[in-house]
Image (cartoon, rainbow, N blue to C red):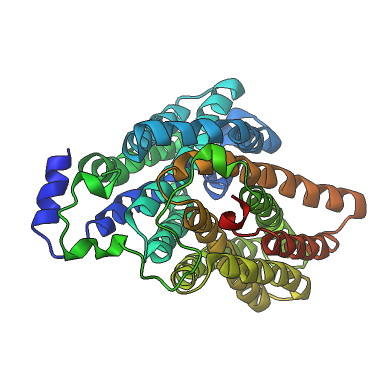
Amino acid sequence: MNQLAKFIEKNTSFYYGWIIVAGSGSTMFVRNAAATLTIAVFVYPMSEDLGWSRTLIVGASSLAGILSVFISPLSGYLIQKYGSKKTLFFSISLLGISSLLISRTFNPITFYILFGIGRIIFSSPVQIGASTVVAKWFVNNRGKATGILGLSHSLGMGLFPLFAQLIIDLDGNNPDSWRISWIFIGLLVWLISLPLVFFTMVDNPKEINSNDKKYLELKKTSGNKDRTLSSISLRNALKTRPFWMLSIVGFLTYFIHTGVNIHQAAYLIDKGINPIFAASALTIMALGTGVGSLVTGWATDKFSSKYVYFFGCIWLGLSALLFLLISNIVLAYLIGFIFGMALGGLLVIPPVVLADIFGKDNIGSIRGYSEPFVSAGQAVGGISAGLIYDFTGSYELSFPMFGLIALLACIFIIFSSNVKKIN
């Protein structure tokens, strides 16, 4: 299919890398078929129709998150060996199939397998594959391009639950309406992403590089002093301090990310906010995530990505502490948006900073070994905040804990010395 890519590249004046961003962004958008906010829409109708407990339904997401810790290295290996195009195409195909088949599920084991597959795809191959191919196509605008991926995810995060709910509501009197919604979700996944990935995705610019002025993008002129054109192998990357320091930062930041996200609606309701408005605050947060992705992407192209990471962690910690000030819906919206901007930074900075330091040639396999830290942070963060609530009857102690963890993440960033100084 590279012939079509070569034709487009030859007959257009813009850099083909932006077509790559569109294709990889489509995968980030549709991966939200397996997002926690999407499954949240199905908890009530599936529980009522099948007689399952809500904990049982939500548990599929938690189990898949734990499994992703072990799947991420495999995803990185497959991306490195076979390329992002084949990995993403297979992953999106499987995500569509699993969504379609959930519509036919009648027992918990089948549901856990099918939704678990989708959730693992959400966490590993799509997340790593999309950012890896973008890193290979961009040097000077790597941050901006990755920021668009974050924006694509944010749009999907807001629109997929809405789409699912609209389909369910079309035939609200039918207890099986949730099954129809899963069918439409599976078809939507395929229609939006598969054509773009199949027809336009190219793993490496060298495959269609005409060496004209459009490819000056691949020469470093960025103001980011961390960005390098040389690459380091996975074996050598694993021997460096930056890899382990930044991987721990990934664990710490996503500990905060999930700890706040999964309990946010319940916390707002505890504060006396109407459940409908509490849910709408999540949509406002998604808008903030999109804005934060673009702003952070721009910043990582202009400044050292590790400096941006440092200030992003400060923003994350302070915005988590701001939740203690919420007393009405206006503050809930405002603080949710501010926190969402910090989450947008988390979608952009980790893949950019790793590609900046270790180079783009082996970034897929390197991400495969750093991503389990993120999955572990997601698994532990939500549980920790839940335990604090169970023991104290309140979330009030959770937010100071998140602030301290963000400070700890800043310290790890400071001690992640430059890779060149280590080798």
Q: Quarter-wise, where is residue 413 in the image? A: bottom right
Q: Residue at x 39, y 41 (%)?
A: 185
Judging depth in this view, the residue of 231 and 95 nearest the camera is 231
Image x and y of residue 45, in percent: 56, 40
Q: Residue at x 76, y 70 (%)?
A: 321
Q: Residue 46 is drawn in which quadrant?
A: top right
Rendering coords of residue 244 (x, y %): 66, 47
Above or below: residue 101 compared with residue 165: above
In the image shown, does 296 or 47 lie closer to the viewer?
A: 296
Classify 28 as above or below 344: above
Is residue 205 shown to the viewer in this render? yes
Q: From the viewer's perspective, is 119 left or right of 271?
A: left
Q: Is residue 3 left or right of residue 330?
A: left
Compared across the picture, whether 259 is left or right of 185 comes to right
Res 270 → quadrant: bottom right
Seen in the picture, residue 182 relative to 284 is either above or below; the reply is above
